[in-house]
Image (tube, grey):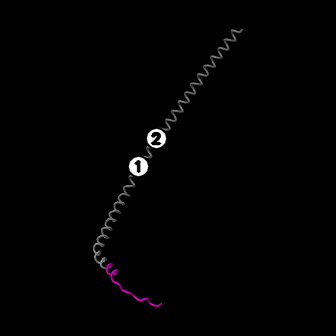
Amino acid sequence: MSAQYSSGIQTLLDAEQKAAQIVQKAREFRTKRVREARDEARKEIEEYKAQKDAEFKKFESEHTQGNKAAEEEANREAEAKIKEIQAAGKKSQDKVIKDLLAAVLTANPVAPSKA
């Protein structure tokens, strides 16, 4: 009878050991699958980010070219105005200096009035 009990106990221990191995394999599989899912998600995120970066750069290049053209036009207009102002200043420079010297060097005393 004790041989029968010991063989039954041994069978239970063997079954328990096999169950533990199955559980361990399931945990390893689950861990592996979680890692794979995380890697897949990370890869998808990187691809999505690269796609959106490319879309943004395309959008930016399309819209900044118009701004560059407007900026260049504004710079040309500003340069033209600056040259015009400099030419006008050179044209009347001698007269302005003469008028300033005359105003500074000529004294016109005025008596104070009684108010």
**Residue 104 colored magenta?**
yes
Q: Is residue 27 above or below residue 75?
A: above
Identify the amino acid type marked 1: Lys
The residue nearer to you, when weighing 26 against 106, is 106
Q: To which residue does mark 1 refer?
A: 57
Expressed as whole percent of the image width and height from the top left, the position of residue 51 reads: 43, 44
Farthest residue in the bottom direction? 114
Q: How many marks?
A: 2
Name the residue beneath numbered marker 2: 46
Asked if labels 1 and 2 touch by Cβ distance under 8 angstroms, the answer is no
Within the image, what quadrant is residue 8 found in?
top right
Looking at the image, residue 28 lies above or below residue 100 = above
Residue 8, numbered label: none
Q: Regarding mark 2 in the picture, which secondary structure is present there?
A: helix
Estimate the x, y position of residue 75 in percent, counting from the top left.
34, 62
Q: Earlier in the sequence, mark 2 or mark 1?
A: 2
Q: Residue at x 59, y 23 (%)?
A: 22
For the record, the magenta segment spans 99-115
Horizontal arrangement in the rendering, residue 69 relative to residue 37 (left or right): left
Bin the neighbour count of mark 2 within 10 Å (Cα to Cα): few under 14, some 14-19, many 20 and up.
few
